[in-house]
Amino acid sequence: MPDLGFALDGLYACGWWPGDGDRCLQYTDGRWYPDESMVLESFAELDTFADIRKPTSSIAVEVVWRSPRRGRQSVLGRSREEALILAFTNLYLEIHTCSGDWLSKP
């Protein structure tokens, strides 16, 4: 299972970069990443709910969501923060690699 540093590698590799108005935290190596409220708001802006689960029989945290284009998706992380960054990375990739027609709101 990856760690937060690995999750940040994926986030930056997909092309995300913090903007001036982004609410971010700073990792020990100096990289910035979105805080939990920013991640959850990003899902909400697309009318998608990110369900954060911590199974009692596991040390992992799971984030589950549904997108119109890809259906049900989930990621596992060792911490809530890591799982949210992995989910945010997937959401970011979907927005920036798909045609974007489902992102248009009436």
Image (cartoon, helix red, strand yellow):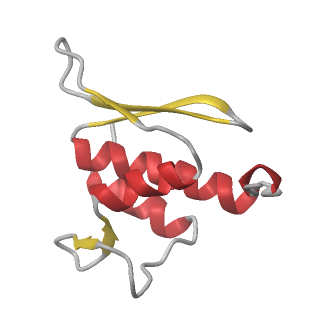
Q: Position of residue 77 (x, y in %)?
A: 31, 38
Compared to residue 15, the image places residue 61 above or below, namely above
Picture residue at 40% right of the left edge, 88% below the top? 20
- The image quadrant that residue 7 belongs to is bottom left
Q: Is residue 100 left or right of residue 18?
A: right
Compared to residue 12, the image places residue 43 above or below, namely above
Q: Position of residue 54 (x, y in %)?
A: 23, 25
Which sits in the foreground, 52 or 33? Answer: 52
Q: Position of residue 58 (x, y in %)?
A: 21, 18
Picture residue at 42% right of the left edge, 79% below the top? 18
Picture residue at 30% right of the left edge, 57% below the top? 37
Q: Is residue 65 left or right of residue 80?
A: right
Picture residue at 54% right of the left edge, 41% below the top? 48
Looking at the rendered image, the quarter that the N terminus falls into is: top left
Which sits in the foreground, 100 or 79? Answer: 100
Looking at the rendered image, the quarter that the C terminus falls into is: bottom right
Q: Is residue 73 left or right of residue 33?
A: right
